[in-house]
Image (tube, rainbow, N blue to C red):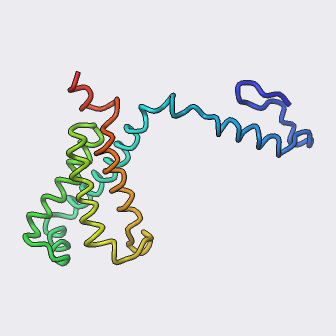
């Protein structure tokens, strides 16, 4: 067995010539000594922005496809005043905000608005259903809030229109 560049050669697993504990130790050493934080630090905000933005945009698109009257009816059942107005605002926030988040444009303000949307959804829809998403709980919306809050605080990252506009 030979280790070069983090790759184990001549494993010989079928012949029983490798010690599984040694193999595990070699791979764990590579994982624990990973320098990916240094090499890929600029990718983290991009990945978080695109994933979070895509989820919000798709939820907004789904609501738009259902129609404003449908969304307004749902919001009316939750006790929102002027449910038609709030339906339009919700669709605009999720769909438009999601797209802007993907682009990294006005990230701080968009993330702040989407964090607020997530908090309202948490309080009005999900909290009473417990933690797990399978029962309509808040685990998913809590993660969307955390992602939005993180982007609001840390910013859009290197690859964003916000950064391009500052140059």
84 up-or-down from 103: above or below: below
Compared to residue 140, the image places residue 137 above or below, namely below
Image x and y of residue 154, in percent: 33, 40
Residue at 25% of width from left, 44% of height from top? 99
Q: Position of residue 43 (x, y in %)?
A: 43, 34
- The furthest residue to the front: 153
Q: Where is residue 103 in the image (x, y as percent from the top left)?
A: 27, 37
25 relative position to 153: left or right: right
Q: Would you identify the image quadrant in which residue 88 lies?
A: bottom left
Position in image of residue 79 (x %, y %): 15, 77
Q: Which residue is drawn at 80% across and 30% down?
A: 9
Look at the picture and state if 50 lies above or below 120: above
The residue that appears at 27% across and 63% down in the rendered structure is: 119
59 left or right, relative to 140: left
Quadrant location of the C terminus?
top left
Q: Which residue is drawn at 82% across and 45% down?
A: 21
Q: Is residue 55 left or right of residue 27?
A: left
**Quarter of the rendering occupied by the N terminus:** top right
Q: Which of 52 and 119 is in front in this view?
A: 119
Count of numbered marks: 0
Q: Which of 74 and 150 is in front in this view?
A: 150
State whether residue 133 is above or below residue 65.
below
């Amino acid at each position: 067995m030979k280790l070069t560049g983090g790759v184990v050669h001549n494993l010989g697993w079928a012949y029983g010539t490798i010690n599984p504990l040694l193999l595990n130790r070699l791979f764990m050493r590579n994982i624990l000594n990973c320098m990916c934080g240094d090499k890929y630090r600029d990718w983290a905000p991009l990945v978080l922005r695109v994933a979070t933005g895509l989820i919000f945009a798709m939820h907004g698109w789904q609501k738009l496809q259902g129609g404003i009257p449908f969304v307004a009816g749902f919001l009316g059942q939750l006790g929102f005043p002027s449910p038609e107005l709030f339906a339009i605002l919700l669709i605009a926030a999720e769909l438009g905000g999601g797209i802007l988040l993907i682009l990294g444009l006005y990230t701080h303000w968009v993330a702040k608005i989407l964090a607020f949307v997530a908090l309202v959804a948490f309080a009005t829809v999900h909290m009473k259903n417990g933690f797990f998403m399978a029962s309509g709980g808040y685990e998913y919306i809590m993660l969307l809030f955390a992602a939005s809050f993180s982007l609001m605080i840390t910013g859009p990252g290197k690859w964003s229109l916000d950064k391009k506009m500052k140059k």
